[in-house]
Image (cartoon, grey):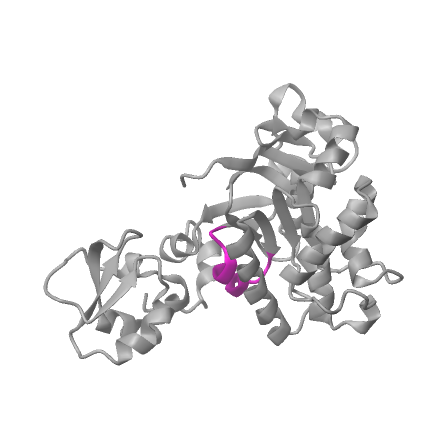
């Protein structure tokens, strides 16, 4: 990717157990056998990743895979046992407690699965609370809170209390509260998993709309691959504390690094994941009844493909509108019935 690296970690470990830091003396790294023999739990093991500015980077895995622990290490809500964490090239392991608190207040936004709204405060009071903690005067913080309340679609409900809101509306308040400080990096830990499926889909739509407006750097945790595919620019898959593979949804589906990753992607309809660029032919011959940009997902082209004559093709273009290949109608139609086993 061309974007600058906003957040990164290098060889991060989080090991639970007495004197776990001794396992890393003089640059040593423990094996799984050594951890088990000593009664240690390797919640995060030798994790390295880069999060680029403006991207949605999703960390996913099953329960107990270490994804939430890793994010808590990235924000130093818990301290890693070993490794390096860089935020705008600044080593978070070397900043003071006061500096870390200031960074959390001004540069990090956090949204968790449980909304944790203050029940005695109204919507505007909850959203303005982080700014109040910063010492911002009342008018300024309420003006800013009103802006983000409008941004998340809750205008008119400023005076409501959490008990008067639906689950989806409460989560919008949590999102607005995290955005009030205008964070550089936005951390979301399974923010929609407690919502019913219809509201969850609605919140995913809202999340994508907000990102199209704000262009935030986002670290998002989920255990749902459908959600990850829908939202992510890139995905890191974790298992037993280790990062197994990092890639775009397409890369994970087309080139899984392990059987574990292959199982994760097995049930995902390919039309949801694959782009026109991934499936096009480099041929550029004749005239084309339809045009599509290379980044378009195949599922968005199915209706148009069905209306085309057999043997016809889309012209696939880059961002400038130049034709870079063609995508046959039959390729699009056939992806509807393809199963992972056939792929």
In magenta, the rendered stretch is 222-234
Q: Nearer the viewer, residue 53 or 311?
A: 53
Q: Height in image: 76 above or below 197?
A: above
Q: Residue at x 64, y 18 (%)?
A: 26
Q: Which of 35 and 270 is in front in this view?
A: 270
Q: Height in image: 12 above or below 219?
A: above
In magenta segment, residue 225: yes
Q: Residue furthest front?
A: 139
Residue 325 pos. (x, y %): 20, 57
Q: Which residue is drawn at 83% across and 67% down?
A: 161
Q: Is residue 290 left or right of residue 235?
A: left
Q: In which quarter of the image is the N terminus?
A: top left
Q: Residue at x 57, y 63 (%)?
A: 224
Please tell me in which quadrant of the rendered image residue 327 appears.
bottom left
Residue 14 pos. (x, y %): 68, 38
Q: How many marks?
A: 0
Q: Height in image: 301 above or below 88?
A: below
Q: Height in image: 176 above or below 8?
A: below
Whether residue 249 is visible, yes or no, is yes
Q: Which of 73 and 104 is in front in this view?
A: 104
In magenta segment, residue 8: no
Whether residue 66 is visible, yes or no, is no
Q: Is residue 225 left or right of residue 91?
A: left
Please tell me in which quadrant of the rendered image residue 101 appears.
top right
Q: Which residue lies furthest to the top in this view?
A: 26
Q: Which residue lies furthest to the right in this view?
A: 120
Residue 151 pos. (x, y %): 63, 60
Residue 165 pos. (x, y %): 77, 71
Q: Residue at x 18, y 55 (%)?
A: 282
């Amino acid at each position: 990717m061309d974007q600058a690296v906003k957040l990164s970690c290098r060889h991060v470990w989080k090991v639970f157990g007495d004197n776990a830091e001794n396992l890393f003396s003089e640059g040593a790294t423990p094996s799984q056998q050594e951890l088990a023999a000593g009664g240690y739990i390797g919640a995060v093991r030798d994790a390295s990743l880069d999060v680029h500015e403006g991207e949605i980077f999703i960390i996913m895995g099953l329960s107990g895979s270490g994804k939430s622990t890793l994010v808590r290490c990235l924000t130093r809500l818990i301290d890693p046992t070993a490794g390096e964490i860089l935020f705008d090239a600044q080593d978070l392991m070397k900043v003071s407690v006061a500096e870390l608190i200031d960074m959390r207040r001004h540069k990090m936004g956090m949204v968790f699965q449980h909304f944790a709204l203050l029940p005695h405060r109204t919507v505007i009071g909850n959203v303005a609370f982080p700014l109040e903690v910063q010492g911002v005067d009342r008018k300024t913080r309420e003006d800013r809170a009103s802006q983000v309340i409008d941004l998340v679609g809750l205008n008119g409900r400023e005076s409501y209390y959490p008990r008067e809101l639906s689950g989806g509306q409460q989560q919008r308040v949590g999102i607005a509260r995290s955005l009030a400080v205008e964070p550089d990096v936005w951390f979301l830990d399974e923010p929609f998993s407690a919502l019913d499926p219809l509201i969850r889909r609605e919140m995913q739509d809202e999340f994508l709309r907000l990102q199209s407006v704000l262009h935030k750097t986002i670290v998002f945790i989920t255990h749902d691959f459908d959600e990850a595919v829908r939202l992510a620019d890139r995905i890191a898959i974790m298992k037993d504390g280790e990062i197994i593979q990092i890639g775009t949804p397409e890369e994970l589906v087309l080139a899984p690094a392990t059987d574990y990753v292959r199982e994760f992607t097995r049930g995902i309809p390919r039309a949801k994941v694959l782009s026109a660029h991934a499936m096009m032919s480099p041929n550029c011959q004749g005239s084309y009844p339809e045009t599509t940009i290379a980044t378009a997902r195949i599922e968005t082209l199915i209706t148009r493909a069905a209306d085309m004559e057999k043997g016809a093709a889309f012209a696939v273009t880059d961002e400038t509108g130049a034709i870079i290949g063609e995508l046959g109608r039959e390729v699009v139609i056939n992806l509807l019935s393809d199963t992972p086993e056939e792929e």
